[in-house]
Image (tube, grey):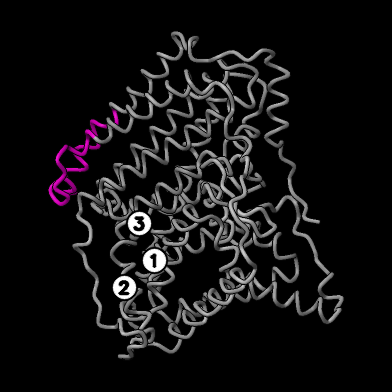
Amino acid sequence: MTHRARTVSAPEELAIAQHDRGPARAAGPRLGRRAVTGVCLVLVVQLAASLEFPAAALAHGIVGRADLPVPVWLFGWAAAVVLVISFVALSVLWTRPQLQSPQNTRLLHIPVIFARIANVAGLLVFAVVIYSGLAGAQVPAVNFSVTFVYVVFWVGLPIASVLLGDIFRELSPWRSCARTVRWVARRARSNFAARTMHLPEALGQWPAVAVLLGFAWLELVYVGREVPSTLAALSLGYFAAMVAGMLAFGVEEWSERADGFSAYFTTVARMSPLCGDGRGSLCVRRPLSGLSQMPILPGTVALVCALIGTTTFDGFENDALWRKLEPGLQTAFSVFSLPSASAQELAYTAGLALSVGLVFFVYHAGIRGVATVSRRYSRHELSRRFAHTLVPIGFAYVLAHYFSLLIWQGQAIGYLASDPLGNGANLFGTAGETIDYAIVSYAAIWYVQVAALVAGHLGGLTLAHDRALAIYPNGRTAVRSQYWMMTVMVAFTSFGLWLLSAVGT
């Protein structure tokens, strides 16, 4: 049996809250002066941010490049106003918890053959990634492995998971391999299939956090990240480690706690309105409601902060401020007589760590504020109870930052599939295709990015409000607790818009 840190379920929270609050009261009509003060505070923060962001945006030329019909700074203000208006609307109209229970509705039964087809497809594609990386041309632009790993796998799968549910559960090659080995062992009546150890409870999801940070370091810091043979070797090593872990500790426990990619894709898939019931049926639920049931283990908060922080650094490293700071950091590390490439990697590693740390600090600063409205919960408990509210923000950062990469570079997988080794083959007749950069305009990309950021932060704000209603004894306390969370959302929105204007994509 898997050992987990105990979490209070949504029904338990509702029962406790209903017992404490007595007859429920609407929060909206009693916002009062404190609500006005909170809203004013947020607008002041946004004013200070907007005074800085226009200069940064103009300096990087996003307005001219995207040919936007309105100034970039106006988007920042509009985003903040949308969040504030949404906060007031939630306070007045959303007076009962709505998302604490997914309330799944069965749509249809999916024959098991489709799951087996997905298992085989995942294994075949993984084999192509390994073979093309090791045997193909060592040129990133013409090798299948590089584009698949960094574009289709890292960017496309999270988006597909939000749209279609937890599809990686069946596509994961290491999961399929481990399940097959255990099935064969059971058929052979081997004691091996019954032997399963357990990870220490205190370890939580920290191994998954290490995996995600390691992949982010590979993608953003390591100078050899685009060498196909290196990428293939690392992929093969990860496959072996995951299969071994799943055989030793169980497929489900290892997937949730040590497989960083499974933990990531499963987490964002909880945003999806589609889900499985564990018995082969496809169900529909309220969007975002799956996040309220997310188990919070040691390291889960760090996992979500890492998603936001790594994407943040990916955008920040293209900003003029980083281009000014990076040479100084590289020089500082050069005093240890390191090669220039190693000094550069250390400089970028420091920047990545600082970006993740900044996100962690902003979130916990907001939680510290939430803790001041009631002594009912400690800061540690609050950070766990509101951790799921960061997931829509993390996904919004991924979609906003990588949307253009997926739309443009994602087209390359069509012709790379015909010539995975880069040796002139044309297996499917698509090797002569090219990337159509006119498929979408810069302005359209920018609008999608802004919409993603605002929608993600609205989702986070909604989840936070719904959770506050569930755990606090009355509506007024719940609303007061969310002044701080709204400030966090506006801060993340403004920062996200600044990063978009800085990189111009």
Amino acid type at mark 2? Ala
Amino acid type at mark 1? Val
The residue lying at 37 percent from left, 57 percent from top is 332
**Residue 391 relative to residue 68: left or right:** right
Front residue of this view, candidates 268 and 335: 268
User: Whole-Å distance between the Cαs marked 1 and 2?
Assistant: 10 Å
> Looking at the image, is mark 1 or mark 2 earlier in the sequence?
1
Magenta-drawn stretch contains 182: no
Q: Residues within 10 Å of mark 2 (few under 14, many from 20)?
A: many
Q: Are marks 1 and 2 in contact (CB under 8 Å)?
A: yes
Q: Which residue is mark 3?
A: 402
Q: Residues within 10 Å of mark 1 (few under 14, many from 20)?
A: many
Please tell me the numbered disc located at residue 270. Answer: none
- SS under mark 2: helix
Q: Which residue is mark 2?
A: 412
Quadrant, the C terminus: bottom left
**Residue 8 relative to residue 468: left or right:** right
**Residue 11 relative to residue 408: left or right:** right
> Looking at the image, is mark 3 or mark 1 earlier in the sequence?
1
The span shown in magenta is 48-74
Magenta-drawn stretch contains 60: yes
